[in-house]
Amino acid sequence: MRRTIGIPCVLVLGLVLMIGPAVQAEDAKVAAGIKAAEAWMKLVDQDQFGKAWENTTAFYREVSTRESMVQSLTAYRKALGRMVSRKKTSASYQAVLPFMPEGEYVVIQYASSFEKKKSLVETTIVALDTDGVWRITEYIFK
């Protein structure tokens, strides 16, 4: 008896073969975004705020001065104290974000603990910059 693979099976296989590379590409972008976010947060954890500003996107540097970022991060760190722990809770690739220019983004959230604030959610938004490098474009904590 001869068996055949039905049309539904062929369609499913074709769909899997088409989606697979797209998912892998998205995973690689998320991994690159996480790596950029963690390198940036390490600078902030070491109070290297000026260097952290240098490692933001061109868009961010157009709308925020080095001095304003240094002042903001200095006040933030003074209020929170040193970082005790940080654990990534989510990371996702986004092609579009509200109030952001068209581009590619990775949104990463961390459950964090600081010396003076035991529970805090940090959110970093990393963007593929104009030179093809993933950089921080937004940092939010609450």
Image: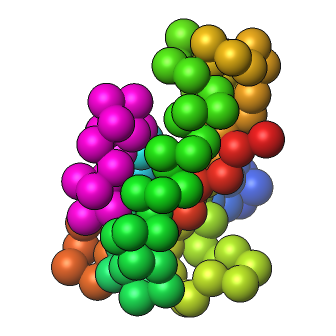
Q: From the viewer's perspective, is residue 33 above or below residue 137?
A: above
Between 104 and 62, the one nearer to me in the picture:
62
Q: From the viewer's perspective, is residue 55 above or below residue 111?
A: below
Q: Which quadrant would the C terminus be assigned to in this image?
A: top right
Between 33 and 38, the one nearer to me in the picture:
38
The answer to which image quadrant residue 90 occupies is top right
Between 48 and 120, the one nearer to me in the picture:
48
- At 62% across and 65% down in the image, what residue appears? 94
Using residue 42 as the reference point, say whether residue 15 is left or right of it. right
Query: Is residue 19 visible from the viewing direction of this image?
Result: no
Between 59 and 22, the one nearer to me in the picture:
59
**Magenta segment includes 43:** yes
Using residue 45 as the reference point, say whether residue 116 is left or right of it. right
The range drawn in magenta is 40-54
Image location of residue 48, percent across then percent down: 28, 43
- At 54% across and 35% down in the image, what residue appears? 77
- At 39% across and 30% down in the image, what residue appears? 45
Image location of residue 75, percent across then percent down: 57, 45
Q: How many marks?
A: 0
- At 59% across and 74% down in the image, what residue appears? 95
